[in-house]
Amino acid sequence: MSTPYRITGATGEWEVVVGLEVHAQIVSESKLFSGASAVFGAEPNSHVSLVDAAMPGMLPVLNRECIRQAVRTGLALDAKVNAYSRFDRKNYFYADLPQGYQISQLYHPLVGEGAIEVLLDDKDETSTKAIGIERIHVEQDAGKLMHDQHPTMSYVDLNRCGVALMEIVSRPDMSSPAEAGAYLRKLRAILRYVGSCDGNMEEGSMRADVNVSVRKVGDELGTRTETKNVNSVRFVMAVVEHEARRQVELIESGGTVAQETRLYDPDKGVTRSLRSKEDAHDYRYFPDPDLLPLELDEAFLAECKASLPELPDAKRQRYEALGIPPYNAGVLTAEVESARWFDALLEGGVEPKAAANWVASELYGALNRLGKGIAESPVSPAQAAELLALVGDGTLSGSLAKQVFEIMLETGDGAADIVDKRGLRQTSDTGAIDTAVDAVLAANADKVEQYRGGKEALFGFFVGQVMKAMAGKANPKLVNDRLRAKLD
């Protein structure tokens, strides 16, 4: 069992308590309450409807697909989906919020309690922890202020205004930077498997508000701070680390932690105060008068459940049942693209354990070298299956397979074509192998005597010389067998 994470201060040890509020942009063609496009990357203010711009008399119309995606997410997290939910107005003024309020859900969210089980150590399957989900509510995003377009003025881009978000609120069940990182990675993976959020944190379609407090071991919860809009797993972990140490130092020096909203400066690795943290009553929530309560029927919920794919944990268990080592199974299921690629490879009839080893070592190594993701792999799953089949039937040795794979990466040609055109087929001709073995032993009579005198480490030298003499095409097992027969 791992040692609990603690901050050691001048007065002793402190526990860290962490909760995350993750804003995940829902994958949909249009926005939550308007028909404007929700696609990222357009020219500023080119995806703005009259509803998004809050023109007088405009009424919101709920996007069914956004609700469907949020329900599917709740089901994937084993959370309670509420058949009845309601939208509320959250009132506050900000320059990129034309309505002067955000349509959200406070009192009756779409999704209630659930949980995510995270693995804290890739090499120890027992090192798991359940992180509670408190709720998922659906709300509209605000626009974006652009401060770098003019020397004295800030511009407003409303393209993002009205885009549908899921706010996924965890319980304060995390107690270290590592646990926060593991939770966020697992949540992101599930969202991407489900297809409800693309998880592109660098584009802002998934970002986290990080709530951190500290306490002496066994004490009540301390005052928390909220660091807003953190856009990478690494930065979330850094915020937990920095903010916990800052709070411990502040308390031990006689100060008190203020309940406030903070921002993270990734260049300096520190958080800084933004504003005092508002409570719910400060936003003057009330039910949105333009939207009826949302009532979901059983047929809709059943369709959402039936549409779910195989999720990461189930896929990992299936891979392990095929004989794939737990670590490799975890690597293959960590990202949906990797799992899809490997599933396609398995459909080619390959031996699962050997295929997993090849993907984890040869394919990932090549992709890292090329700076590509698995979705951009120059070698398709069908081509990889053909290559592994040639290894399996003895046509290619391991070293020849590496040569063929490199040529496949460069040319895009199939493995069988490369073998035929370049004469790279492995030979199991015992006569040819015996000839090469005899020649190597005759040329190295002194080393043969040393080997027979007890220097058995020379055996590898003889294998290498025979393989070199046969241009790497000899069947390695036969070379080993024939050498041992002649030497011993």
Image: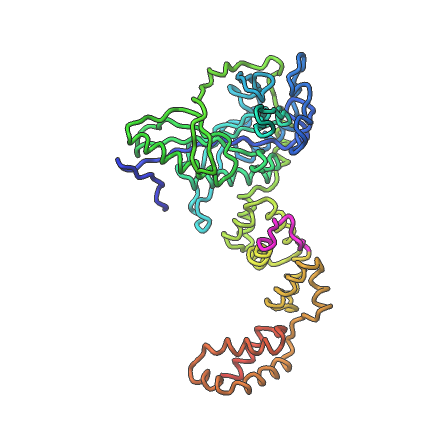
| Residue 291 in sight in this render | yes
| Residue positioned 57% across, 20% down in the render | 95
In the image, the segment drawn in magenta is: 367-382
Q: How many marks?
A: 0
Q: Nearer the viewer, residue 460 or 283?
A: 283
Q: Position of residue 359 (x, y in %)?
A: 58, 55
Q: Is residue 373 magenta?
A: yes
The quarter holding residue 419 reads bottom right
Q: Position of residue 292 (x, y in %)?
A: 62, 16
Q: Is residue 399 magenta?
A: no
Q: Position of residue 195 (x, y in %)?
A: 62, 37
| Residue positioned 64% across, 48% down in the render | 375
| Residue positioned 35% across, 28% down in the render | 221
Left or right side of 421 for 40? left
Q: Nearer the viewer, residue 35 or 121?
A: 35
The quarter holding residue 206 reads top right
| Residue 352 in sight in this render | no
Q: Nearer the viewer, residue 92 or 470?
A: 92
